[in-house]
Image (cartoon, grey):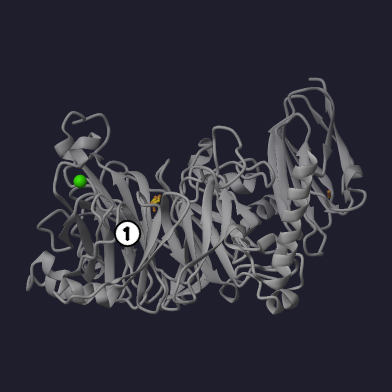
Amino acid sequence: MSDKKQIENLGRRHFLRNSAVTGVAGAGLASGFGAGALMSSRQAQAAGAAAGSVAPGELDEYYGFWSGGHSGEVRVLGVPSMRELMRIPVFNADSATGWGISNESRRILGDSARFLNGDSHHPHVSMTDGRYDGKYLFINDKANTRVARIRLDIMKTDKITTIPNVQAIHGLRLQKVPHTKYVFCNAEMPIPQVNDGRDMENPENYWTMFNAVDAESMDVAWQVIVDGNLDNTDADYTGRFVAATCYNSEKGMTLSETMSAERDWVVVFDVEAIEAAVAAGQYETLGDSPVPVLDGRKGSALTRYIPVPKNPHGLNTSPDGKYFMANGKLSPTVTIIAIDRLPELFNDAIEPRDTVVGEPELGLGPLHTTFDGRGYAYTTLFIDSQVAKWHIEDAIRHYNGEEVNYIRQKLDVHYQPGHNHASLTESRDADGKWLVVLCKFSKDRFLPVGPLRPENDQLIDISGDEMKLVHDGPTYAEPHDCILVRADQINPVRVWRRDDPFFADTIAMAEADGVNVERENKVVRDGNKVRVYMTSVAPTFGLTEFKVKQGDEVTVVITNLDQVEDLTHGFCMVNHGAQMEIGPQQTASVTFVADKPGVHWYYCNWFCHAMHMEMTGRMLVEKA
Ligand code: K7E
Ligand code: CUA
Ligand code: CA
């Protein structure tokens, strides 16, 4: 390095340090994030460190749950630090935890354990009376038409349901009021009904459905056939209405066909009317599926179709419960639908467009809108690479002919944002502190890492009059959406409860074998099936060797007796593709075939103790 370069570098470092201490971080320094982290939070506060910094050892104010897009997982972040706290495998396979490998995870994955891929978009936390209750998180899988539930006490997926009769679950939202009884989810792609090879050449006979999954049983409660297709959705705060966008009212099979009509629509579902119709037996079933299928096409009493500008995308309910907002995408507008006019629409007292009370023009490519609970809305503009902050009631006044400017600010984001999400925005508690903007392209914002680039999740302080960008967060493919929940609304357990249903079937198997997994280390043979029960206490397995015969199907069941928080063991059988996590007080199991004679070592692969490397054992496989 030249002397000049060295001096420049020193100068830059010096400037960084000084600016952090004095709190006068320049424009080019973005946030003073890393620098703020060098100080205690009190010092940082005293120095006026940039908003968004959370010092080492300090805890975040919000949990953020991020979808992992086509990685298939869910990620847990702390906000505002944007530190990644955990990854929850859902529709993917995960080596570290053994998701898709362990018997417990494979039981939950069920029939779809054969799929290694997923595409999760929309994570949403269960609600009671319009407030997050911290019990479950639900998420869609577009790739294999599934819906999953994550238990937020253990932060593990505990149910996965494949939705019958449809393809590609995309939009997903929860009933907010009186509580999350239903998970509402949209199947995006119209298909022949029944889709068994008949009638493939007639797209006009393709249909898709709006689906309701029972949040407790995770059974599909009912499905409603619609005209067109379905994209995004949201529910209201009365419990009666759910709205969804349709970008393909044309039922086009090509891009240009899907853009041919000047208008598409928002379809509104009357949940009470649907429940009454199900109770009255006004439904059919299709194919092998027992799920009630109702007709919600145009003319049905169960739905209403509200025309909106072409190819809308996001659908968002304002936290005051007044409006559904449909984001224009191909149109620079957001359509504001007054929820209190919907009962009249269903009574045919007004026309569909009479429910529209505003249609502000915001910029190019509006995709999603979020809210601060103070009357402002924040809309991502994909093509403009901006977030528009606008005033909802001013936009309505403007629609009524008043000369009023409803746009308050447009902030550049980097680049091409999809979803954005403000803290607590999908609940009555929307608090307008933080806005996360999930940008699809990072371009020049980070060191290059080859042709595949990270996305860029930006954190914006919206507590004041002006939006302020405070953090760039590179993320792996591809957070479509996220949800920010106050830290006190989530209550995870510290160690497993021994009676947790997550591994109850494994305990039942042990009991059938007469084994007490907390006390006994034992090998049970059942024909060519061998079950190996062992305990683990750092840094040893209860069995340091066991013997089987070549060709045996071996199930290793391990119970982690450690009671210490954070003391997770692993189990890996070398050369057998068997690997899993065993958290404190958890029982976990994995099954493989001992197809090779000889000595095969197993070891613990979650670092648990100074002697973690020595936490090993041998499987001795006798030649057949
Ligand atoms: Cu806009 Cu799947 Cu919610 Cu992506 S969706 S951005
Ligand atoms: Cu047990 Cu590492
Ligand atoms: Ca269209």
**Measured along the vertical axis of the image, is residue 21 above or below residue 587?**
below
x 46%, y 55%: residue: 413
Pointer 1 local density, CA inside 10 Å: few below 14, some 14–19, many at least 20: many
Q: Position of residue 269 (x, y in %)?
A: 23, 63
Quarter of the image holding residue 23?
bottom right
Q: Position of residue 187 (x, y in %)?
A: 32, 48
- The amino acid sitting under disc 1 is Thr
Quadrant (top left, top right, bottom left, bottom right) of the C terminus:
top right
Q: Which of 387 and 252 lies nearest the eye of the viewer?
A: 387
Q: Which residue is mark 1?
A: 233
* Residue 285 in sight in this render: no
Quadrant (top left, top right, bottom left, bottom right) of the N terminus:
top right
Q: Residue furthest front?
A: 4
x 72%, y 49%: residue: 581
Quarter of the image holding residue 245?
bottom left
**Measured along the vertical axis of the image, is residue 369 above or below residue 612?**
below
Q: Position of residue 175 (x, y in %)?
A: 37, 68
x 21%, y 41%: residue: 258
Q: How many numbered dots are placed on residues in this image?
A: 1
**Measured along the vertical axis of the image, is residue 104 above or below residue 336?**
above
Q: Which of 342 and 330 lies nearest the eye of the viewer?
A: 330
